Amino acid sequence: RGVLKDYKQATKWYRKAADQGDADAQYNLGVMYENGEGVLKDDKQAVKWYRKAADQGDADAQYNLGFMYAYGEGVLKDLSKAKYWIKKAYENPSANSKTKNLAEENLNELELWKY
């Protein structure tokens, strides 16, 4: 059975930790803003929190930030910044295999977009 999901409560606790510099909480807050879970959907806020976590080396945040740049969600579309962040995620030694695979696929796609 487990516990019911309470996105508003989760947002409250993630924000406390994120404000203290916790990269995992910053990433999770970004996800919540991107998906509108516990907060109003806000891609600019998602980018803000992904960037904070990405700057601390969070591979998932680096990938998501690159994705936001690739598609112009919450930021102006910028393929060079997209490639930069997705490549950082791909090269990040702490990235899990799922993130590495997604990053590799998207780097290949971004190369094709040039033509």
Image (cartoon, helix red, strand yellow):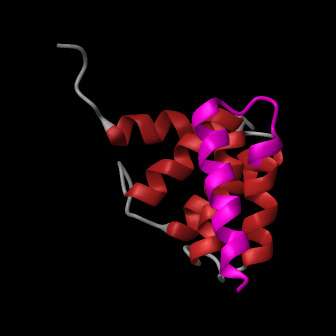
**Looking at the image, which is closer to me, 23 or 109?**
109
x and y percent of residue 5 in the render? 27, 31
**Looking at the image, which is closer to me, 43 or 82?**
82
* Rendering quarter of residue 18: top right
x and y percent of residue 25 in the render? 60, 36
Q: Looking at the picture, does residue 63 appear above or below residue 44?
A: above
In the image, taking residue 109 as reference, residue 79 lies left or right, namely right
x and y percent of residue 53 in the render? 72, 45
In the image, taking residue 48 as reference, residue 10 lies left or right, namely left
Q: Looking at the picture, does residue 37 appear above or below residue 10?
A: below
**Looking at the image, which is closer to me, 12 or 52?**
52
* Rendering quarter of residue 71: bottom right
Count all numbered tags in the image, as a single digit: 0
* Rendering quarter of residue 27: top right
In the image, taking residue 67 as reference, residue 78 lies left or right, namely right
Name the residue located 78 percent from the left edge and 70 percent from the top edge. Answer: 81
Quadrant in which the N terminus is drawn: top left
Name the residue located 67 percent from the left edge and 75 percent from the top edge. Answer: 112
x and y percent of residue 63 in the render? 66, 52
Check residue 60 for magenta coloring. no
The residue stretch that appears in magenta? 89-115
Q: Which residue lies furthest to the bottom in this view?
A: 115
Name the residue located 54 percent from the left edge and 37 percent from the top edge. Answer: 14
Quadrant in which the C terminus is drawn: bottom right
Name the residue located 57 percent from the left edge and 63 percent from the top edge. Answer: 45
Check residue 99 for magenta coloring. yes
- Magenta: main secondary structure equals helix
